[in-house]
Amino acid sequence: MVISRKEFFKEPIVRVNTKRIRFPRMCPVCGSTVTKTVRVSTIPGKTRWLRPYWDPMYGPRARRRLGISLPQAQTFIVPVCEKHHYGDESEWRYRVVCLIVNGIIISALFMALVTMGSNFWLGRANPFWVYPVLTVFVVAMVLSYLTFRSNPFESAFRIVGFDAALQHIWLQLKNHEYRDAFLNENPMSSELVSWIIRH
């Protein structure tokens, strides 16, 4: 069963034809002159199911039996300035390392909490190593937040999704000057919308 819902936006978003999309020669974050490009990839038609196993593309055997192939990823080349250029590969590498380190720290935290609970129950003082583990855990959580938060480009240029026919893409552009330039660059194939229907 497919979930359909109406989603409203405080600021209007841009609906543009994916076949005729053209990006203005200005940075979507700050509006300055562009010198580099960022590759933005997304997979259209990701349907939300109430249960994953209801999805006919959930398992590879089911996909082969039904003759269904995975949707092709859509890639867009967005011009940006030198300051707001970023490589998503290095960023994801940092995030994977962060997840591995957090797993180790959470294991140490579990041991520290068990030791603290045991010492509290027995009326004994905690060993010295418990407090540095708690401090490292707090620092790791702060660093994890900084690692996984959206960078300036992701905040300024966000792909909201695709329409049901996969012919149009919805873009949330934070910079109003860039949004106006984008609409001027795509006068016949783009428009502002304040709500969408997600499937």
Image (tube, grey):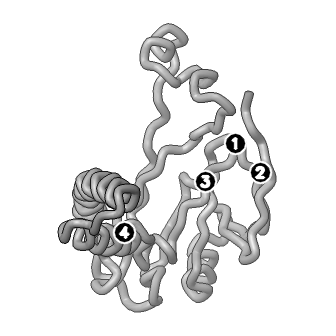
Residue positioned 77% across, 58% down in the render: 7
Q: Name the residue carrying label 2.
A: 197
Q: Please tell me whether mark 1 or mark 3 is closer to you in this view.
A: 3
Q: Amino acid at mark 3?
A: Gly
- Circles 2 and 1 in contact, beta carbons < 8 Å: yes
Q: Please tell me whether mark 2 or mark 1 is closer to you in this view.
A: 2
Q: Which mark is residue 117?
A: none
Q: Position of residue 118 (x, y in %)?
A: 34, 54
Outermost residue toward the top?
65
60 or 184: nearer the viewer: 60
Task: Determine if residue 132 is in view.
Answer: yes
Task: Determine if residue 106 is in view.
Answer: no
Q: CA distance from mark 2 to mark 1?
A: 9 Å
Q: Amino acid at mark 1?
A: Ala
Q: Quadrant of residue 143?
A: bottom left
Q: Position of residue 80 (x, y in %)?
A: 37, 78
Q: CA distance from mark 1 to mark 3?
A: 10 Å
Q: Amino acid at mark 4?
A: Met
Q: Quadrant of the N terminus?
A: top right
Is 169 left, or right, of 116 in this rendering? right
Circle 2 sits in a helix, a strand or a loop, which is it? strand
Circle 3 sits in a helix, a strand or a loop, which is it? strand
Q: Which mark is residue 141?
A: 4
Outermost residue toward the front?
123
Q: Which mark is residue 161?
A: 3
